[in-house]
Amino acid sequence: MNIPQHTELVKIIKQAQQTLENSSLPTSKNEDWKFSKIADFNPETYEAAKNNPVSKEIIESILGNESNSFKIVLIDGIISPMYSNYPQDSWKVLPFSEALKNETYQTIILSKLNSISNNENYFNVLNTASYQEGTFIYVPKQTIENQLIELIYISSKQEYKAISNLRNLFVIEDQSQIQISERIHTLSELDIFHNIVTEIFVGKNTNFSLYKIQDDKHSSCLIDSTYIEQEKDSNAFVHTFSFGGKTVRNELSFDHKGENINSTLKGVTLIGEGQEVGNHTLVKHNQPNCESHELYRGIYQDSAHGVFNGKIKVNKIAQKTNAFQQNNNILLSENSSIDTKPQLEIFADDVKCSHGCTVGQLDDDALFYMKQRGIHEKEAKALLMFAFCADVMESVSIPYLKNKINKIIAQKLDVNSDFEI
């Protein structure tokens, strides 16, 4: 990997290294980590991941040929031009080391990198102190891209427990439209810890969508921290689908910098077999006349554990705010559990805000009704759980992605992939 040599970038990394030396790993006494498996993220138990070759056959099997989306393939955090396809004359995808050679991109990167991530978060600091390359996506003003852009992170086989720190910076300028999806494929059979930090800047009157599909190996752990800053009249949608991985923690933060902003956060978690997924969200309403819509649904089987910690902050000047937050969960086993904590902090008086959470089991009456009509119990339960997820799935606007996610859900519920919904 190339270590960025720009003076200001080196300065940022060194500052983070100094901060890290004076920091300590969070513990269960920290409110934000109270319910999480912090031991799985102890960096002292991992070594830095190496960049190893991956065969063409394996990469092509991961890519598949199900969609005509643009693909950006990263192997151990390094963009692979051989397997990536995207236009070269409109929006740009560059590693930091290349982008910094261009005066315009250099100015953008140095003004925005590490400016909205949480520099009090231990793992964000660890990422900044450790990364050796990053991915820069730049979308110029008035760019309309209707084709999905897939970011595919491939982690090569390692000879030891390894940690991988990935860094992204997306800058989408005014009056643009773009849709991105992300997924990770870990090839190692050993424990791998992915620590990803992504900063996203959404310009004025811009539409941005991000789909996160987390269905990695059971031996992998993931901390995925995403920070979004929105300018006025913009729309940002983030869907997080968590199905795989040993322990997953999603940190998602929105910051409003103008009026008439719409932020949408939705997610489905479906896990079992001792897995843990935590969704930690923060929406900062800092301007008047903005909206946020948050809906997370969780299904927990076997001894799975979920955490939801959603916070909405409404600033004193953020009048006419409309903020909605909901977290609903189904426990399919006596050994599964969820710790959920929706929070509202409101300092303005002319607002419409609501939040709530539910934890329950499948509807026995509905299940009995379907079984009486000849539907097998397994399929009947699956039907109920698909219906439970429907409010999230209906806002997935890309048919290819919706079909892919439905197939994963069917697989997790052990019903036929051609299961009719």
Image: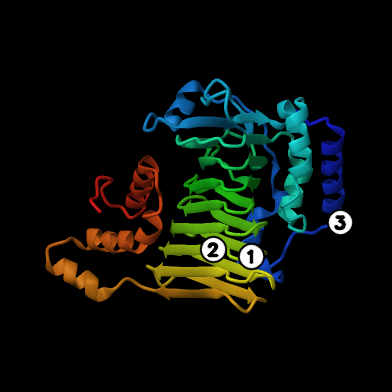
Q: Nearer the viewer, residue 178 or 121?
A: 178
The residue pinned by badge 2 equals 292
Q: CA distance from mark 2 to mark 1?
A: 8 Å
| Other-residue count near label 2 (Cα within 10 Å), few / some / many at <14 / 14–19 / ≥20 | many
- Looking at the image, residue 176 lies above or below residue 352: above
Indicate which disc residue 285 carries.
1
Residue name at image x 69 percent, y 54 percent: 42
Numbered label attached to residue 176: none
> Which type of secondary structure does the marked residue at label 1 adopt?
strand
Identify the amino acid type marked 3: Asn
Identify the element where label 3 is drawn: loop
Q: Is residue 342 visible?
A: yes
Direction left: furthest residue = 373
Point 57% across, 48% down: residue: 205
- As displayed, is residue 356 above or below residue 208? below
Quadrant, the C terminus: bottom left
Camera-side mark, 3 or 1 = 1
- Disc 1 marks which amino acid? His
Q: Mark 2 or mark 1: name the one nearer the start of the chain.
A: 1
**Amino acid at circle 2:** Ser
- Residue 122 in the image: x percent, y percent? 75, 56
Secondary structure of the residue carrying numbered label 2: strand
